[in-house]
Amino acid sequence: MDALIRMRGVSKSFAGAHGTHHVLRQLDLDVFPGDRLCLIGPSGSGKSTCLRVINALETIERGHVEVCGLDYETSKLPVHRIRQHTAMVFQRFELFPHLSILDNVALGPRLVKKVSRAEAEAKAVELLTRVGLVDHMRKYPSQLSGGQQQRVSIARALAIDPRVLLCDEPTSALDPELVHEVTDILQELAQQGMTMLIVTHEMAFARRVATQCLFLDQGQIVERAAPEAFFENPQNPRLQQFLQVIRV
Amino acid sequence: MHPRSLSWLFTLLSIVLLVLLGGMLVYSFFNLEYDWDFRFLTDYIWEPETNRPGLILQGLWGTFYISVLSIIFGTALGLAVGLLMIGPEPVARNAATLFVDIFRNTPVLVQLYVMYFIVGTAFNLSPEVAGISTLSLFCSAYVADIFRANVVEFERGQLDAAKAMGLNRWQIASSIMAPQILRRMLPPLVGQFVSLVKDSSLVSVVSVNDLTKSAMNVVSVSFRSFETWFLVAVIYCVLNYSLSSYGRYLEKRLRVGSR
């Protein structure tokens, strides 16, 4: 089986106030169909950058990133065509404020999949029903709560039929009592076999949803294991320390 | 401190100030000992002998078409210059920035003189063409800068979301950025258009028949400058008030859904 995402020797650094900061160091990562990987790690460890690199939202200095066998650097396809195989859910939702909920979700199918408006809207209605927001489809993003906006953004991401769903801290900007709205839906997607790569701080959620958990530290994956082993029997000392701190 | 505890003091202060200012104005008018008479102006609004629009109405038409054309050309040119300013081509970008800086930092009157007496002499421009060109160029510099600022400050997050979705550059520009940026540009644009209508009075110095030029003509034959300028001020005010009211109406209608 071919990997949907293949990262090889990916390095990236930012020039900061205190010299160069290496965000990713020689990172290798494969995501196969049906994988649900949770990226866990301290802040600044490169989790979000890793996701953004997969979507070519960040440039890299060395290494290769392939999505569905297409290398961003060597493929003859333009970047936006390669991006169409993945979809992303952002920490701060990033819905388009000038479009209604329905149009936010229907935009992808219309522009990316080039289907008719009617067909795109039918698909949007179906997805909004799935995330339980079809009653709000005439409203605008600013009229919804954070949890509802994030559910819309999940529907928007699914609307382009991505092979992989990338989630960048999907619950970090939510009020605590709204977190489950979003994790419930992601868990449902997981059960339906969606391939996902999730950056999260919700350990209980990671445990429930992940096939494998990855610990990122200083731009490298230092531990990769099934959730049970990852949380109960961590091998890497930095992961042990990290888990101890967040359990307090 | 709680703001409410001060409110009556502020109200009192406002009333005192308004009464003082109003009093000064009323006193000045009475002190003038001038025999106000607005009736003669009707003849200049509509000429009774020829039964045709008088000087004032002709001037109003002049101001109207000069402003409208300048706004249209200025906006179109301004968007083009704005695009160059944010574009990747360094020569065009610097040239566009220089253009904007020059036109924003020099008086319109000087620009008009250069356009009419120097460029106009070389290319044989009529006063109207010189006036409209100057106002269009002046207006475009402001439009370009308003456009540039809105594009540069557009939220990164939304752009990332649009890119991640797989939209191409043209789709992002037309479906995501343009609708929001045009909406946000509206209030500053309307403000710019209002000042353009007022600035259009400057074309009278190169003897274009606008409202201000008409007023000068009326004054020179009637010798009643106070009444004439008073009427002209009211007309400018009505013109600009309708323009800004329409802008507010559009703004309100377009705001739906935007944050």
Image (tube, coloured by chain):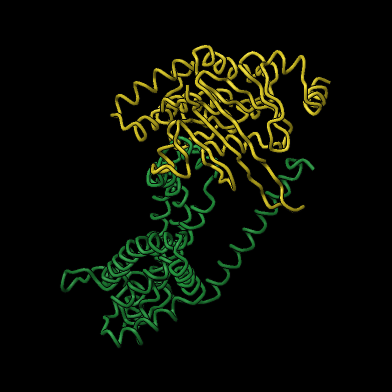
Q: Where is residue A193 in the image (x, y as percent from the top left)?
A: 50, 15
Instruction: Please tell me in which quadrant of the rendered image residue B232 appears.
Output: bottom left
Residue found at x 77% / y 22%: A235
* Chain A shade: yellow
Q: Where is residue B4 in the image (x, y as percent from the top left)?
A: 73, 40
Count of marks placed on residues: 0
Q: Which chain is green?
A: B
In the image, taking residue B50 as reference, residue B189 lies left or right, namely: right
In the image, taking residue A171 as reference, residue A56 lies left or right, namely: left
Specify whether residue A138 is in view.
no
Instruction: Please tell me in which quadrant of the rendered image residue A46 appears.
Output: top right
Nearer-the-camera pick, B196 or B47: B196
Q: Is residue A35 above or below residue B15?
A: above
> Which residue occupies the extreme left position in the image?
B50
> Which residue occupies the extreme front position in the image?
A1
Nearer-the-camera pick, A137 or B7: A137
Residue found at x 22% / y 68%: B53
Nearer-the-camera pick, A217 or B170: A217
Residue found at x 68% / y 49%: B11
